[in-house]
Amino acid sequence: TQLLEQSPQFLSIQEGENLTVYCNSSSVFSSLQWYRQEPGEGPVLLVTVVTGGEVKKLKRLTFQFGDARKDSSLHITAAQPGDTGLYLCAGASGNEKLTFGTGTRLTIIP
Amino acid sequence: GAVVSQHPSWVICKSGTSVKIECRSLDFQATTMFWYRQFPKQSLMLMATSNEGSKATYEQGVEKDKFLINHASLTLSTLTVTSAHPEDSSFYICSAIRSGHVNEQFFGPGTRLTVL
């Protein structure tokens, strides 16, 4: 069974601070995706990383895929209240199915 | 583009009744759709893979006779929770893969099922 552990599970920080969320596994994934989910809604795709060592930037969000394609990180610079939500990583293994991480609930305090 | 809808968005039913949830890809064709359930404050757990024109593939521990999946067209998959019980109360979310775009799953807004 593939497991994706995210850390921290909960994070509450002040507006303007930086933060990093980690997504770790012992399994290799062909690609890894990051989603943000608001309460009562479905997840919204933020980014897909495919190549080991790949770094993608989306405004204040920086995503990195580990060299061995087993882990990933999400770094947010100057967090804003609009960044509040549940962040989920999800790994794909070539058969189209996604394995979701345990989730990180982020709260940005104005 | 790539919008996925679910209907209903929420449903309350009595124990023992069956509930059908629809998942539609509005502006693209999807040969493969997935059904997930999410308990409060938890992540998404894959229930089954829905393939157009063939039987669904269920994950280990998911009762196929309880959660009936039908993918009759390239834009519609349905999940029927049969003889629902309170422990089936959950947030059910579907996703669809746009044909030819293997790495992209587009998620529906979810359906909140409450069984009394």
Image (cartoon, coloured by chain):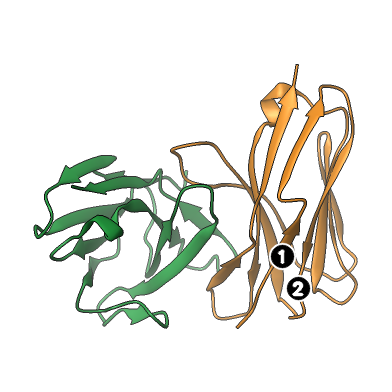
**Disc 2/disc 1 C-alpha distance (Å):** 6 Å
Q: Nearer the viewer, residue B35 or A55?
A: B35
Residue B20: image tag: none
- Chain letter of the green region: B
The local crowd at label 2, few if under 14, some if 14 to 19, many if 20 or more residues have their Cα within 10 Å, is: some
Quarter holding residue B10: top left
Element on which disc 1 rests? strand
Q: Determine whether A72 is above or below A110 in the image.
A: below
**Chain ID of residue with mark 2:** A
Q: Are marks 2 and 1 in contact (CB under 8 Å)?
A: yes
> What's the residue at 66%, 68% (across, down)?
A91
Q: What amino acid type is highlighted by mark number 2?
A: Ser
Q: Which mark is residue A5?
A: 1
Which numbered dot is residue A25?
A: 2
| Circle 1: residue type | Glu
Picture quadrant where residue A24 is located: bottom right
B79 up-or-down from B3: above or below: below
Chain drawn orange in the picture = A
Tag 1 subunit: A
* Relative image position of residue A105 (x, y in whole percent): 66, 42
